[in-house]
Image (cartoon, rainbow, N blue to C red):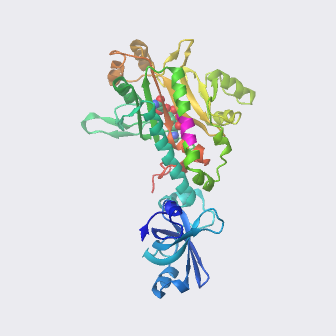
Amino acid sequence: MTSTFVDKIGAYVGQEIEIKGWAYNFRSSGKIFFLQFRDGTGRVQVVYSKANLSEEQWAALESVRLESSVVVTGTVKPDRAGTGFELDGTSFRAIQIAPDDYPIGKKDHGPDFLLDMRHLWLRSEKQWAIQRVRNTVINSTFAYLNENGYIKIDSPILTPNACEGTTELFEMDYFELGKAYLSQSGQLYLEAAAMSVGRCFDFGPVFRAEKSKTRRHLTEFWMMDAEAAFVEHEGNLAIQEGLICRIVADVLAKNAHELKVLERDVEPLKKVQAPFVRMTHAEAVKKLRELGSDIGDMDDLGGDDETILTKQHDKPIFVEKYPAVVKAFYMKRDPQDPTRVLNADLLAPEGYGEIIGGSQREDDHDALLARIKEHALPVDQFQWYLDLRKYGSVPHSGFGYGLERIVGWICGVQHIRETIPFPRLINRLTP
Ligand code: 4AD
Ligand code: MG
């Protein structure tokens, strides 16, 4: 008999097959037993009738409790709705019968309870769907970048200094060498690698110790940093636009079922097409003031500002040329207005806000040295980074995305803690 998976059973209509998985629900009339079965690839109902099963197998079936692990065999047939399949059960075997106290039930549980139960909550259908979308976003990112000449370069997680801002660092003692910090972004290392391979990206966990307790902040999250030699501000935005369009198109094509499970309205996602909306920081501030915000000319945009702006448009928005004072030291100044930088934040629609931060990098040795000093960063620690501007400096640009922010937006979930398998928040380190 063929052993297969739920997502493959359509190829076996009329045939008897075996699948291994878990019982996520069940009900019995005493003669007919409806087993709601899942195997990781999907869900299917297995209908057993007592008349067709040995006494031992029927008894085993009746002993099933939620989330017991089981092996089922049955004949594949179209289900009653005509939209999927079900199995006419032919045999049943329990691998392990779970006790009758599975903690997650049908009733509404609070978020704290569910997060405490994260190791089990991951099995719930919506959580399953989110992880499948996340997988597509990751694969789609690798595909797009590889197709556009980027190679993957792994940046270190243990670092001697800050990339983004010194206040957000997780610090630890590092043998005889003093302090080490968990990486906030691999960007600076990718800039070095880009001068070797031209275009590169990394993908891995990064860490931020900022005490932000919002639906957009994790202390550990997955970032993709991309960096390219000879790409300037305009080119940088075009690459980001292409990447986001590709990711959304792939999810729409590959995860229609998952988006349905998540009750995600796909119409707004279908509108994610180039060209995206573009506005300067100055224009964004003007618009926000019209909408009632008290944001100052040279202020950073807050989460609420981003939410308000994105509700004005149904496409992602690039907000470019922020004041230099609110951005990182490495960003290149705008030659038209040296108080501003050649950067852009990409804001996702429907109120989701920043999903990408990127910029053209300062490529002039002396200008960069001046910035490092202005930001009171240790010049000796940045000597290697300055070397990149000494030996064959070229204009270059890059950006970094927050995987959980992108997945949260595409899945339409409220808080990004649901998009990472085991979220780390300022008040949560378990399970
Ligand atoms: O805007 P950020 O801080 O940019 C950088 O770190 C650059 N070095 C990236 C680069 O140019 N290579 O972070 C990039 C993205 C943000 O746009 C956001 O999507 C996400 O990372 N992000 C977070 N996601 C979850 N929790 C947090 N605390 C995040 N902080 C940033
Ligand atoms: Mg940012």
Question: 231 and 341: which one is in front?
Answer: 231
* Picture coordinates of residue 194, whole percent (x, y): 38, 26
The N terminus - image quarter? bottom left
The C terminus - image quarter? bottom left
* Picture coordinates of residue 68, whole percent (x, y): 47, 72
Q: Residue at x 54, y 64 (%)?
A: 43
Q: Which residues are magenta?
A: 243-249
Q: Quadrant of residue 85?
A: bottom right
Q: Residue furthest front?
A: 14
Can you say whether 314 is above or below 418 in the image?
Answer: above
Magenta stretch, overall SS:
helix
Can you say whether 410 is above or below 75 in the image?
Answer: above
Q: Residue at x 68, y 36 (%)?
A: 314
Q: Quadrant of residue 247?
A: top right
* Picture coordinates of residue 93, whole percent (x, y): 44, 77
Q: Is residue 177 magenta?
A: no
Question: 151 and 153: which one is in front?
Answer: 151
* Residue 332 shows in the view: yes
